[in-house]
Amino acid sequence: MLSLSMADQPLNVLRSAELKRRGIAAVEEALRFGPVHLLVRNSPAAVVLSAAEYNRLRRQADQPVTAGSSCLEWLLELPPAAVGRSKEAIDAELRQVRDW
């Protein structure tokens, strides 16, 4: 098992060669650390979830969307950031990443 970092989030990675060699035991071991990202020829191929996580996502997907819910309402319901940023700081950050 190999841990990579993408966008500052560690990924729980299992390569196809190790899966072939160790079988389901490799998947079971990796699932202890969260979803398992399967790589085939060093390219992402699939993600394996525990049954509990899969069922949680299914229940969440089955929840009806409340009428009148909007992106703005969703954003307003988010908890505040631990460290606030000023409008000027956000604008400066956006200028750095924009290339148009």
Image (cartoon, rainbow, N blue to C red):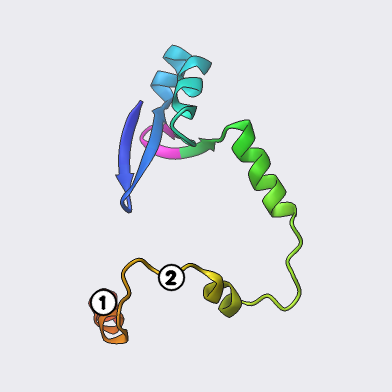
Which callout, 1 or 2, points at the residue further toward the start of the chain?
Answer: 2
Indicate yes or no whether the magenta region holds residue 43: yes
| Numbered disc 1: secondary structure | helix
The answer to which quarter of the image holds residue 51 is top right
Q: What stretch is highlighted in magenta?
A: 38-44
Q: Which residue is drawn at 53% across and 17% down?
A: 24
Expressed as whole percent of the image width and height from the top left, the position of residue 97 reads 27, 74
Task: Count residues near mark 2 (Cα–Cα under 10 Å), then give few for <14, some for 14-19, many for 20+.
Answer: few
The amino acid type found where label 1 is placed reads: Glu
Is residue 26 or residue 89 the one in the foreground? Answer: 89
Q: Mark 2 points at which residue?
A: 80
**Residue 41, image quadrant:** top left
Would you say 10 lies left or right of 56 here? left
Residue 59 vertical placement versus 30 (above, below):
below
Residue at image coords 53%, 76%: 76
Quarter of the image where one finds residue 48? top right
Disc sitting over residue 93 in the figure: 1
Q: State left or right for residue 50 relative to residue 61.
A: left
In terms of secondary structure, where does tag 2 sit? loop
